[in-house]
Image (cartoon, grey):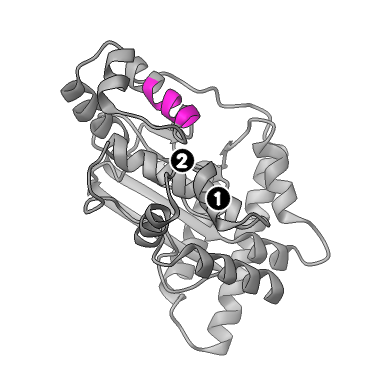
Amino acid sequence: MNHGLENAASFEGMITDRHDYDACYAYNEEWGLYGLHCHDFYELYIHYSGANFYCIDNDVYPLEPDQLIVVPPFCMHGLIGENTPKNYERAFLYITPAMLKSCGGSQIDLERFLNKYIQSGKCHFQLTSEDAQTCKNLLKNLANDLRSTSTVTRFTNHVRVLNFLAVVCQTMKRSQAVTEPVVVNEVMQEILSYINEHFTQQMKLETLARQFGVSVSFLSHEFVRYTGRSVYDYVLHRRVQMAKALINEAIPLNEVAYRCGFNDYSNFLRVFSKMSGMSPSAYRKMNKDAKRDA
């Protein structure tokens, strides 16, 4: 796959220029598939209505109203399938591990609490209708006031984050059922799973299509319709996702590039910078500064 990067979407960052948390509430009568994406912070997503299926890496889950989904950093995720959502209502909080630590204070390790459930296979949780409305109001108000420079409003926003996290923790704690993944498109799901397991290797569309018994044109068209991204774009996202995780460790950047499937550092630098908005070294420094200031 030797296509250019002109159409490759960037790694998802915060909505505003914040670096600790962000919030959104939105309703759309019609919504095109946004495409699977990832970021280096947690997403606490609430589905209210309109969408059918949500993907986290290899698994696809049915969506129900008032459903909370906890997405950890570096996981490809998003709406998936062939249907265009209508009357799509959702809200979410983006929050960094450092901010989770700050919010937990000396009372609770919030990141460890979230990961305990995620690692046991639970990422979907059902909110009560009352809690779902509470979360909607909190996130609506939070999103509206995020750009305020008022000290009192900023403090109020912090309290809203704490209240939202309290509802999330209580919901997760009382949840018993595990949402089982489903198959929406068997061929595309098999191809997606294969790519997720082999994205650090050299991959050609022709070879991939032949392996799964489909034509190149079918693969190209159906993969975009299923995931919202081209195969090439998706592979790049997975590689940069892996690179961001490795950069946080004490590994030389040349080694990071090699482990993530890039042939040389210059290509890695070009792709990473275009998709992340900064160089690998700048990203490493930013993370070190954030940990020091946490």
Please, is residue 21 above or below residue 212 in the view?
below
Point out the stretch of residues depicted in magenta.
Answer: 191-198
Frontmost residue, 130 versus 144: 144
Secondary structure beneath label 2: loop
**Outermost residue toward the right in this view:** 106
Residue drawn at the location 73% of the way across and 48% of the way down: 113
* Residue 99 coordinates in the image, percent (x, y): 64, 66
Q: Quadrant of the N terminus?
A: top left
Frontmost residue, 37 versus 273: 273
According to the picture, the residue beneath numbered tag 1 turns out to be 256
* Residue 218 coordinates in the image, percent (x, y): 19, 21
Please, is residue 74 above or below residue 281 in the view?
above
- Tell me, yes or no, if residue 58 can be seen here: no
Frontmost residue, 119 versus 210: 210
According to the picture, the residue beneath numbered tag 2 turns out to be 261
Q: Is residue 165 left or right of residue 61?
A: right
- Tell me, yes or no, if residue 94 can be seen here: yes
Q: Earlier in the sequence, mark 2 or mark 1?
A: 1
